[in-house]
C-alpha cells in the first residue's frame, strides 16, 4: 500500500491542487494504518493492541481522507471535466459506487473505534483493521484508475 501511494504521488503529484492535498492525506492514512497494523517497518506485538489515542487519531485521518475524496476531489474533478467538455460519466458510474462501498467500511470502522475510551472490548480490532485494510487497498485501486483516466483525458497535467 505504501509503495502504491508513493507511485501515485510521483505520477500525479503537482497536477492539481486538490489531488496533491488528497495524495498527502492518502500517504498519512497509510502510514498510520501500517503503524496500527504493525506492518513493516512499523512493528507491534500481536498480543498488544495499539494505544487508544493512536486508534482515535487514525480514525480522524481516515474520515478526513474519505471525506476529501467524496466532497472535494471527486466533485471538483467531475465539474472541471464537464466544463472542459470531457465527460467521465461511464467511469464515474462504474467507480463511484465501488468507492462508496469502501467508504461505508471506513465509516463503520470509525463508528466502532473512533470514540474509543479503552481497549477492553476490542477483541475484534485486528480482524476489523484487516478488513479495513482490504477495503483501503481496493479504494486505492479504484482511485488510481480514476486518476489514470483523468490523466488520459488530459484533465490532469502529466
Image (cartoon, rainbow, N blue to C red):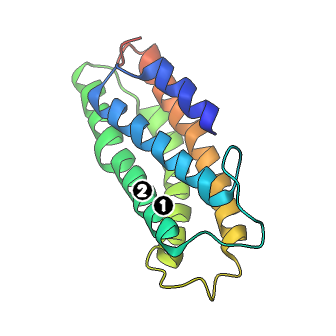
Q: Who's the residue at 44% across and 17% down the image?
A: 151
Q: Who's the residue at 38% across and 39% down the image?
A: 22
**Could you say whether the residue bearing mark 2 is in a helix, strand or loop?**
helix
Q: Is residue 23 left or right of residue 129?
A: left
User: Which disc number belongs to residue 97?
Assistant: none
Q: Is residue 36 left or right of residue 90?
A: right
Q: From the image, which quarter does the C terminus lie in?
A: top left
Q: Is residue 108 above or below residue 97?
A: below
**Location of mark 1 (residue):** 58
Location of residue 120 by image quarter: bottom right
Q: Are marks 1 and 2 in contact (CB under 8 Å)?
A: yes
**Location of mark 2 (residue):** 61
Which percent across, then down, holds residue 86?
33, 20
Number of marks in the rendered image: 2
- Residue with the most extreme left position: 83
Q: Is residue 153 left or right of residue 98?
A: left
Q: Is residue 72 above or below residue 5?
A: below
Viewer-proximal residue among 24 and 18: 24
- Residue with the most extreme bottom position: 120
Q: Who's the residue at 38% across and 13% down the image?
A: 154
Which percent across, then down, holds residue 100?
49, 54
Q: From the image, which quarter does the N terminus lie in?
A: top right
**Pointer 1: residues within 10 angstroms few (<14), some, or many (20+)?**
many
Q: Who's the residue at 25% across and 33% down the image?
A: 79
Which percent across, then down, holds residue 17?
27, 28
Which percent across, then down, holds residue 98?
55, 49
Spatial distance from mark 1 to mark 2, Cα to Cα? 5 Å
**Could you say whether the residue bearing mark 1 is in a helix, strand or loop?**
helix
Amino acid at each position: 500500500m505504501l509503495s502504491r501511494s508513493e507511485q501515485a504521488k510521483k505520477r500525479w503529484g503537482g497536477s492539481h491542487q486538490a489531488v496533491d492535498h488528497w495524495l498527502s492525506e492518502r500517504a498519512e492514512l497509510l502510514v498510520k494504518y501500517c503503524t496500527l497494523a504493525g506492518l513493516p517497518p512499523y512493528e507491534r506485538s500481536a498480543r498488544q493492541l495499539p494505544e487508544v489515542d493512536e486508534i482515535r487519531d487514525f480514525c480522524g485521518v481516515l474520515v478526513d481522507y474519505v471525506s476529501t475524496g467524496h466532497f472535494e476531489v471527486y466533485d471538483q474533478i467531475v465539474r472541471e471535466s464537464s466544463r472542459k467538455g470531457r465527460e467521465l460519466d461511464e467511469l464515474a458510474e462504474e467507480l463511484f459506487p465501488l468507492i462508496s462501498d469502501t467508504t461505508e467500511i471506513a465509516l463503520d470502522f470509525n463508528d466502532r473505534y473512533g470514540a474509543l475510551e479503552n481497549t477492553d472490548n476490542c477483541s475484534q480490532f485486528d480482524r476489523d483493521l484487516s478488513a479495513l485494510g482490504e477495503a483501503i487497498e481496493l479504494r486505492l485501486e479504484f482511485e488510481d484508475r480514476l486518476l489514470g483516466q483523468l490523466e488520459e483525458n488530459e484533465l490532469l497535467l502529466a
